[in-house]
Image (tube, rainbow, N blue to C red):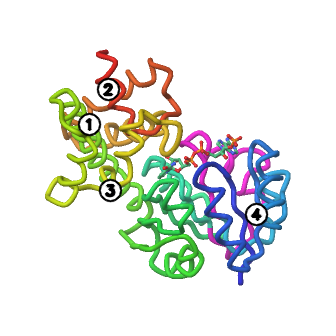
Amino acid sequence: MSKIAFIGLGNMGYPMAGHLARLGHSVTVFNRTASRARAWCLEHGGTQAATPAEAAAGADFIMSCVGNDDDLRQIILAKNGVLEGIQPGALLVDHTTVSAALARELAASLAVRSAGFIDAPVSGGQQGATSGQLAIMCGGSSADVERARPVMEGYARAITHMGPAGSGQLTKMVNQICVAGLLEALAEGMYFAEKAGLDVQKVIDVISQGAASSWQMVNRHKTMIAGDYEHGFAVDWMRKDLAICLDEARRLGLELPVTEQVDGRYARVQDMGGGRWDTSSLLAVLKSGR
Ligand SMILES: NC(=O)c1ccc[n+]([C@@H]2O[C@H](COP(=O)([O-])OP(=O)(O)OC[C@H]3O[C@@H](n4cnc5c(N)ncnc54)[C@H](OP(=O)(O)O)[C@@H]3O)[C@@H](O)[C@H]2O)c1
């Protein structure tokens, strides 16, 4: 069992840290909103730290899952950040979806402290975090990935080493590019089914057995039919991810026409007040006629 710090107890981090505590690791948590860390400790019996530096002190592994590039910089590099508390030989495993450039920068900053870093963004949603069934794509040295593997297995069903620092984030970009177009297609299909007078549930029941099936179709159609979007992966986060993808594509000199278009559709969800709605809410845009 290891001494582990977990920073960021949001939709994803809260259940992920919970799995580690249940497995018997000694877990210290930090969250910006302290009441959430208190609630986590009451549920799981870990220790609450006052700062990221305090959480990192003495830990073998530091896992982070915060929001975006700025948030990650803040908890690692700012005053009272992880870099101030981390011990030589420790390993930082970041599960946040951020730019590949930041992953490479953090790997270099940690190396100066003789500490390791892997970028380890996840896929599988809140459900995957809760059931411990995430897919994790890792960038860094293979030795560091293998060292972190037994810990990450506490909440993952697949852990793949993709290459040097930043490769995990580049892989996550591919995931988000694939998901964006797919979600718009799913919303358009369901919208079409309803307007054509079909029983949408029956349509999904049959087509999910064939070539059009997807994780989103299987796991999101019921809430889409109900118009319930108060769960899951927030549109604000998706727009953050698509900005990262489009930035990287520009750097590579590539056009991603569908991804760009879907990003614009998500801007409309935000205009409807749906920044925290699940990404399946593209159907709400179609229904609103915006
Ligand atoms: N949700 C999903 O389905 C999903 C799936 C795959 C990947 N991801 C990625 O995983 C990451 C987390 O997603 P999430 O859904 O768990 O987000 P979330 O529910 O918004 O949680 C983010 C957490 O990070 C903390 N945080 C943010 N900025 C911070 C800062 N500057 N200092 C300290 N703590 C800070 C927040 O603290 P507060 O409590 O104070 O807000 C919150 O606990 C994101 O990068 C997201 O893109 C999410």
Magenta range is: 63-91
Question: Ligand 1 within 8 A of label 4's CB?
Answer: no
Which residue has dot 4 on it? 56
- Asked whether disc 1 touches disc 2, contact meaning CB atoms under 8 Å apart, the reply is yes
Give percent across and percent down for residue 186.
25, 41
Task: Say which of 277 and 6 sits in front.
Answer: 277
Circle 1 residues within 10 Å: few <14, some 14–19, many ≥20 = many
The residue type indicated by label 3 comes to: Trp
Give percent across and percent down for residue 272.
45, 19
Residue shown at the point (34%, 48%) measured from the top left: 176
Residue, far top: 290
Give percent across and percent down for residue 278.
46, 39
Q: Secondary structure at mark 2?
A: helix
**Marks 3/2: CA distance?**
21 Å
**Marks 4/3: CA distance?**
36 Å
In the rendered image, the vertical position of residue 232 relative to residue 103, given as above or below? above
Which residue has dot 1 on it? 184
The residue type indicated by label 2 comes to: Arg
